[in-house]
Image (cartoon, rainbow, N blue to C red):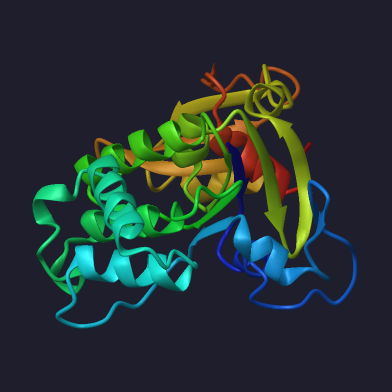
Amino acid sequence: MFGLLGPNGAGKSSLMRTLATLQDADSGTITLGDINVLNDKDGVRKVLGYLPQEFGVYPRTSAEELLDHLALLKGFSSKSDRKQIVEQLLIKVNLWEQRKKAVSSYSGGMRQRFGIAQSLIGNPKLVIVDEPTAGLDPGERNRFYNILSEIGENIIVILSTHIVQDVRELCNNMAVMNHGKVLFSGTTDDALLEVKGKVWEQRVTKEELQGYHDRYKILSSKLVGGQPLIHIFSDTDPNEGFNKAEENLEDVFFAKLNELV
């Protein structure tokens, strides 16, 4: 499972759409095994599962009916084969009990789980998942994590997100993107090593915050109990009340965006 991390507008969705054969690249090459992705789009589509950031559904169409229709479009002409595929996939994503309900009536989490089900039709070699957990509540997000983690044990999954926690919890390998460029590529552990021992934290008052921005390389500032907690980047102990912080991928993310490492 490979995490692609970057802010909104970094180029993640453009890259995903190019990999999914939905748009052409201006230059460069992409290969999936022996398949030339840019030249053999039909070959890619036969082994691809894709869950875009947003997808539409037919109104008043149940999950069971819609999956059957999508399986037919994927080339499964046998009605009995499609029935078996639909049943297996709906059970896999824990939607079997809701199979008769219209997908348009599903909650955000249920809809994303249906999206995973449709992406797995035909046993793909590659599944692309674009910003899957935006807008999900914590319970739905955890259920989605569990499904993605299970899928990633057997096939390649590329997860595009701007949510750092998604990458840390799910992916062994990752890349950081911004303005269409890859700023880092490697394991999540390697990413953390880039800022190890160089992240410091301190709680400050809201009135002091601007002064710290002027004096230090601030990676992040978030409210904890109504008071700003800042993380700064420094090769040496900055003193002034700072404590060494346990580095996280969010620190790596901002350090890369600000070209500090």
Image position, residue 159 (x, y; %): 54, 48
Q: Name the residue nearer the viewer: 257 or 124.
A: 124
Residue for point 54% across, 21% down: 242
Is 227 left, or right, of 41 in this rendering?
left
Is 117 left, or right, of 17 in this rendering?
left
Can the viewer see residue 123? yes
Image position, residue 135 (x, y; %): 30, 59
Identify the residue at the far right of this view. Answer: 28
The quarter of the image holding the C terminus is: top right
Image position, residue 21 (x, y; %): 67, 71
Residue for point 31% across, 48% down: 89
Identify the residue at the far bottom of this view. Answer: 59
Q: Name the residue nearer the viewer: 79 or 16.
A: 79
Vertical comparison of 247 with 135: above or below: above
The quarter of the image holding the N terminus is: top right
Is 190 left, or right, of 77 in this rendering?
right
Residue for point 57% across, 38% down: 155
Can the viewer see residue 216? no
